[in-house]
Image: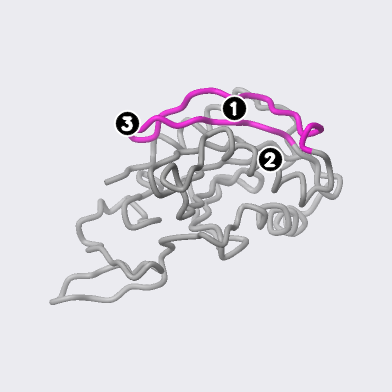
């Protein structure tokens, strides 16, 4: 049996690939203004925390993960490029990754998907064409059109299946991904996990 610590080391090594130099808006702290709590973001912006629902965790200045207690546990992101990570079970995780590039910089959905797969190929040591893409389908995040790609990789002998929803905006590329360590297929259970995850995302 593979130990949980090994799973975490696999997650740390494998999912650092998602970090980007154009990373934006991660939470860096909290403070107060005139007695009201605020959340501070790495891009210099802030937002009142007390306007959030009590069951919502702010992830970005305009995005929260809601309805999460007691099923989801927030865990430290495996790299600075990941805005937030939550765990549902020892082998089931979800992450938010936001980059300051979008359609205004010439990014298209196909190129965004290619960059993600290139990064995964680089860290796992396989060719992009050898990464099985298990699904590529339209998605929706809080009323916004997106695309979800699911793919499988093997890292240090451990199979992992990702479902990565990509939301491409004018000046932002937002990834909301779930992954299951030890999986070899994009199962109905993983689809349900990912759908639940997306349904808990609220955007301003």
- Of callouts 3 and 2, the N-terminal one: 2
- Of callouts 1 and 2, the N-terminal one: 2
Of badges 1 and 2, the one in the foreground is 2
| Tag 1 and tag 3, C-beta contact below 8 Å | no
| Tag 3 and tag 2, C-beta contact below 8 Å | no
Indicate which disc residue 143 carries.
Answer: 3
Q: Which residue is mark 2?
A: 117
**Total tally of numbered discs in the picture:** 3
The structure residue drawn at horizontal position 26% and vertical position 46%, both measured from the top left corner, is 204
Can residue 148 be found in the magenta stretch? yes
Callout 3 secondary element: loop
Of badges 3 and 2, the one in the foreground is 2
**Percent x, y for residue 94?**
54, 46
**Percent x, y for residue 16?**
66, 57
Q: CA distance from mark 1 to mark 2?
A: 23 Å
- Of callouts 1 and 3, the N-terminal one: 3
**Percent x, y for residue 198?**
44, 36
- Range of magenta residues: 128-152
Q: CA distance from mark 3 to mark 2?
A: 26 Å
Q: Quick one: 40 or 146, which is closer to the camera? A: 146
Callout 2 secondary element: helix
Using the image, determine if residue 160 lies above or below residue 49. Answer: above
Q: Which residue is mark 1?
A: 189
The structure residue drawn at horizontal position 66% and vertical position 40%, both measured from the top left corner, is 180
Of badges 1 and 3, the one in the foreground is 3
- What colouring style does the render use? one colour
């Amino acid at each position: 049996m593979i130990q949980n610590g090994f799973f975490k080391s696999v997650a740390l090594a494998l999912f650092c690939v998602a970090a980007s130099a154009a990373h934006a808006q991660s939470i860096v702290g909290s403070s107060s203004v005139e007695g009201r709590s605020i959340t501070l973001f790495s891009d210099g912006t802030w937002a009142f925390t007390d306007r959030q629902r009590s069951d919502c965790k702010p992830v970005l200045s305009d995005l929260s993960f809601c309805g999460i207690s007691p099923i989801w546990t927030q865990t430290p992101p495996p790299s600075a490029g990941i805005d937030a990570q939550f765990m549902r079970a020892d082998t089931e995780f979800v992450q938010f990754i936001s980059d300051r590039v979008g359609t205004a910089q010439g990014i298209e959905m196909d190129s965004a998907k290619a960059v993600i797969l290139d990064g995964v190929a680089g860290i796992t040591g396989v060719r992009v064409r050898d990464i099985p893409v298990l699904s590529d389908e339209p998605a929706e995040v809080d009323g916004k059109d997106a695309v979800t790609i699911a793919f499988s990789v093997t890292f240090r002998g451990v199979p992992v299946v990702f479902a990565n929803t990509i939301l491409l905006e004018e000046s932002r590329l937002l990834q909301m991904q779930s992954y299951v360590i030890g999986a070899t297929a994009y199962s109905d259970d993983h689809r349900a996990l990912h759908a639940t995850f997306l349904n808990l995302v609220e955007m301003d």
